[in-house]
Amino acid sequence: MRVAVIGGSGIYDPDILTCRRGERVDTPFGEVEFERGRHGGIDVIFLQRHGAGHALPPHKINYRANIWALWQAGVEAVVSTSAVGSLNPAMPPGSMVLADQFIDMTRSRASTFFDGGEFGLAHTDFTEPYCPSLRSLLLTAAGQNGLSCHDGGTYLCVDGPRYETPAEIRAFRTLGADLVGMTNAPEVVLARELGLCYATVCLVTNWATGLGQGRLGHGDVVTVMKQNLEHLRLLLGGVLRRIHEKGRCDCGPPMAQVGRHSRLPD
Ligand code: HPA
């Protein structure tokens, strides 16, 4: 399967691709830029979620255009990276976590392709929001590279760009959140709607507000992300070929397949 990596905060150049070339594509939702490159003999696409120079705040990212552009480029599997705050004492800063559930607390984002307009209407199953087979490949690659990685965690997505209040974090804990971030919803939703295998490697950059350090700034988040970049590189380097070789799983809902064939020439 063709693989794409979506880089979040602090991951502006994963340094895992050779022969890189930029590409600008049109989608029904707007223009998208990404890079194509090679990794260990396979084609990989790298998309920087926040755009060049981290120009786009989380609530202004054109998630629909990004996911559509990858799908249009023939991508079938997406591994994304996400900086997150932790609400779970077992997941301290520096931890890597493969999210297996999410809670969407965003309010201001276009979060579906199926809004009854041009692409019709569909109710997509979200029993397993993140592809179990991608997660298992990531977990194996982590183990083989001596990296510790939590298997499973609930990612709660907020709009941002501000960080949370301590009261919000206390409320989110009662909802069952382990991690808080600003980008996984609707990214994972849109990927599932188009039948892509999608997994996210969450890198805990800080304790959620009120649980640890004092005030929190974006600089602190990026610093911790950069300190752990080598782990992410190792993990991605150890997994991309295996994903490329993996077969299709249950991630493709029928509705997305209908959409794919009706819109795009073979
Ligand atoms: N909250 C929301 N998003 C984040 C955080 C946080 O604490 N850390 C990194 N991204």
Image (tube, rainbow, N blue to C red):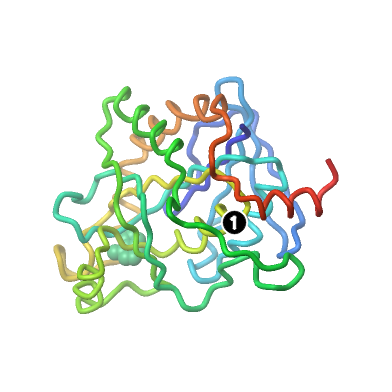
The kind of residue tagged 1 is Glu
Q: Residue at x 74, y 55 (%)?
A: 259
Disc 1 is placed on an element classified as: helix
User: Can you say whether 249 is above or below 60 in the image?
Assistant: above
Which quadrant of the rendered structure holds the N terminus?
top right
Would residue 218 be visible to someone looking at this image?
A: no
Q: Position of residue 213 (x, y in %)?
A: 15, 63
User: Can you say whether 246 is above or below 179 in the image?
Assistant: above
Q: Residue at x 49, y 68 (%)?
A: 57
Q: Position of residue 112 (x, y in %)?
A: 59, 66
Would residue 138 be visible to someone looking at this image?
A: yes
Q: Position of residue 11 (x, y in %)?
A: 45, 47
Mark 1 surroundings: few (<14), some (14-19) or many (≥20) residues within 10 A: many
- Seen as rendered, the residue at the extreme right is 265
Q: Residue at x 57, y 29 (%)?
A: 247
Location of residue 206 (image quadrant)? bottom left
Side of 138 where 166 appears, left or right: left
- Of 94 and 158, which appears nearest the observer? 158
Side of 29 where 183 appears, left or right: left
Residue tagged 1: 193
- Of 150 and 249, which appears nearest the observer? 249
Which quadrant of the rendered structure holds the C terminus?
top right
Instruction: Locate ligand 1 by image quadrant.
Output: bottom left
- Of 156 and 25, which appears nearest the observer? 156
Q: Residue at x 24, y 46 (%)?
A: 94
